[in-house]
DNA sequence: AATATCTTTAC
DNA sequence: TAAAGATAT
């Protein structure tokens, strides 16, 4: 056993229920923590998460300090940074797994490096209930349908003996292993865009616990219905905390099991955790999903290239209020309500017929909760080219969706304030309001708010026609 | 985790 | 004749 340990933080920004951290403190006299910031993973790709990351580092650094552990932030490629560790350093490296194909591939190289340099290492299950390798159909092939996958997976999780909760030992001797740690401020994005996220989020472990308690106390009972109403704060909003491991999914699952009121809402919420597991499984068995359609017949789909439309979509200027509200919420807060994510995604892919990968890319850059598996799998789900996907002909009507799920316009008028005087009857089709009334409320469609960039009925029919062309093959 | 349209039913 | 149900996309 080496004298020293390094806990390599990747997506586990928490103290509680952190097996890698706890084990390191139990087994070693000296413990340090490291985060390796690789700009290649963030610059111009995941800008919103740069902000969440920098705040998470600040907060974790404070929490670790209380345990007498320094968080050393290193800049560069993971392999290069870790290559300075040599046998004489007398150190064991601990980490938790991350289930992204690229990260897994890099992890293999790092393990080879450690073996070559005679560095001891130990890794643990990541932020997931059941590892995808454990979950295949009886014939050994991966699941492609959600319901049987989740039924089996949840049973498997329940049947396993609960993992022993190892506690963090507090009497740790402080040590620094790396030279030239960078300041966390260097990671903070330079642009002002991210500043406003501070109004909406506090990326800390403490806050994650608050969100979970709020879910259990006030949200879960009515979750089944409330989660569909974007004007109501009915979803858990735990996704960014889950992504950065400020909370472990097992903690959430167990808390949900503990509560007495096991109503429909409870099952509905647990199911969402199931979709997260399913996405991880899919992306790992079918890593080609990251680069293209899972269903090969979609490779012939006549996508439309239209930068003007794409720009309007990104800016929340499509002329469809519920779509624009969603896109503006995303840009303003780094997050979008789940129901609205489906609406805006359907609009991009079906009304505008722009490739789902364009939407995936934009979400990746703007979402603080961006998760490769969930994002790619769900975009393919909406586009109809994924596993257990929505059929292509299931086309959301952006007018109806608004009227159904944001009846009073609470959400839409919040994010599209220029429509605040629009009568609810016309809120989702403001172009139908007579010109003289538009003038009266000083909202002229085409001047104060854009005209719809595409006609719903025409776009719907065009999408169905486009779908027919691939069905023949 | 849809919508549009056609058909039947209920009054 | 509106609402509910069935069906195609």
Image (cartoon, coloured by chain):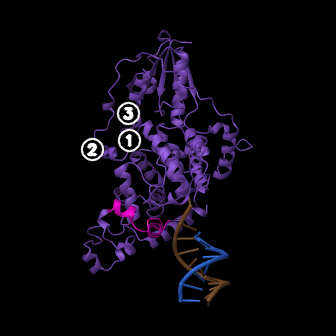
Chain colours: A purple, B brown, C blue
Towards the viewer: A128 or A259: A259
Residue depth check, mark 2 versus mark 3: number of the one nearer the observer: 2
**Circle 2 sits on which residue?**
A192
A55 versus A297 height, above or below: above
Count neighbours of disc 2 (C-alpha within 10 A) and say few if under 14, some if 14 to 19, many if 20 or more. Answer: few
Residue marked by disc 3:
A39
- Mark 3 Cα shell of 10 Å, populated few (<14), some (14-19), many (≥20): some
Q: Nearer the viewer, mark 1 or mark 2?
A: 1
Could you tell me which secondary element the residue under label 1 belongs to?
loop
Is residue A294 visible in the rendered image? The answer is no
Q: Are marks 1 and 3 in contact (CB under 8 Å)?
A: no
* Chain of residue at mark 1: A
Q: Which residue lies under the disc numbered 1? A: A202
Q: As drawn, which residue projects farthest toward the top? A: A88
Q: Residue at x 39, y 68 (%)?
A: A454
Asked whether, in this view, residue A207 is left or right of residue A277, the answer is left
Quick one: label 1 or label 3, which is nearer the N terminus?
3
Real-space Cα separation, disc 1 to disc 3, in angstroms? 23 Å
- Residue A184 lies, with reference to residue A457, above or below; the image says above
- In the rendered image, residues at marks 1 and 3 fall on the same chain: yes
Question: What stretch of residues is rendered in magenta?
Answer: A396-416
Badge 2 marks a residue whose secondary structure is helix
Of callouts 1 and 2, which one flags the residue occurring earlier in the amino acid sequence? 2
The residue sitting at 31% across, 38% down in the picture is A189
């Amino acid at each position: 056993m080496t004298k020293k340990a390094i806990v390599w933080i990747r997506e586990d920004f928490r103290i509680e229920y952190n097996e890698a951290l706890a084990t390191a403190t139990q087994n070693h006299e000296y413990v340090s923590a490291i985060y390796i910031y690789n700009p290649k993973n963030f610059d111009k790709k995941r800008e919103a998460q740069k902000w969440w990351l920098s705040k998470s580092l600040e907060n974790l650094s404070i929490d670790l300090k209380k345990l007498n552990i320094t968080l050393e932030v290193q800049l560069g490629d993971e392999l290069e940074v870790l290559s300075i560790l040599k046998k004489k350093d007398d150190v064991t490296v601990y980490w938790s797994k991350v289930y992204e194909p690229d990260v897994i591939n890099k992890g293999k190289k790092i393990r080879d490096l450690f073996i070559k340099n005679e560095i001891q290492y130990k890794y643990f299950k990541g932020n997931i209930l059941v590892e995808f390798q454990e979950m295949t159909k009886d014939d050994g092939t991966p699941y492609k349908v959600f319901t049987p996958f989740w039924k089996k997976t949840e049973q498997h999780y329940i049947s396993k003996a609960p993992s022993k909760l190892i506690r963090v030992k507090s009497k740790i001797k402080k040590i620094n292993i790396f030279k030239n740690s960078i300041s966390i401020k260097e990671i903070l994005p330079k642009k002002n865009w991210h500043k406003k996220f501070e109004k909406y989020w506090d990326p800390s472990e403490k806050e994650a616990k608050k969100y979970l308690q709020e879910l259990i106390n006030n949200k879960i009972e009515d979750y089944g219905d409330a989660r569909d109403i974007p004007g109501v704060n009915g979803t858990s909003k735990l996704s960014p905390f889950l992504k950065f491991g400020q909370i472990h999914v097992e903690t959430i699952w167990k808390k949900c099991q503990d509560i007495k009121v096991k109503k429909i809402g409870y099952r509905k919420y647990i199911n969402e955790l199931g979709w997260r597991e399913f996405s991880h499984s899919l992306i790992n068995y079918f890593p080609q999903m990251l680069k293209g359609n899972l269903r090969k017949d979609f490779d012939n789909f006549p996508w439309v290239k239209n930068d003007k439309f794409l720009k309007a979509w990104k800016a929340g200027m499509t002329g469809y209020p519920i779509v624009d509200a969603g896109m503006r919420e995303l840009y303003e807060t780094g997050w979008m309500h789940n129901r609205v994510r489906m609406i805006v995604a359907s609009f991009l892919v079906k009304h505008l017929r722009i490739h789902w990968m364009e939407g995936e890319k934009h979400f990746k850059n703007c979402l603080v909760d961006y998760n490769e598996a969930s994002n790619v799998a769900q975009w393919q789900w909406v586009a109809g080219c994924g596993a257990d996907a929505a059929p292509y002909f299931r086309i959301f009507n952006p007018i109806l969706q608004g009227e159904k799920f944001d009846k009073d316009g609470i959400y839409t008028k919040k994010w599209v304030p220029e429509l605040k005087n629009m009568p609810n009857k016309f809120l989702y089709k403001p172009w139908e309001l007579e010109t003289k009334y538009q003038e009266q409320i000083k909202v002229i469609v085409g001047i104060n708010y854009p005209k719809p960039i595409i006609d719903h009925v025409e776009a719907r029919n065009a999408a169905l026609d486009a779908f027919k062309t691939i069905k023949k093959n």
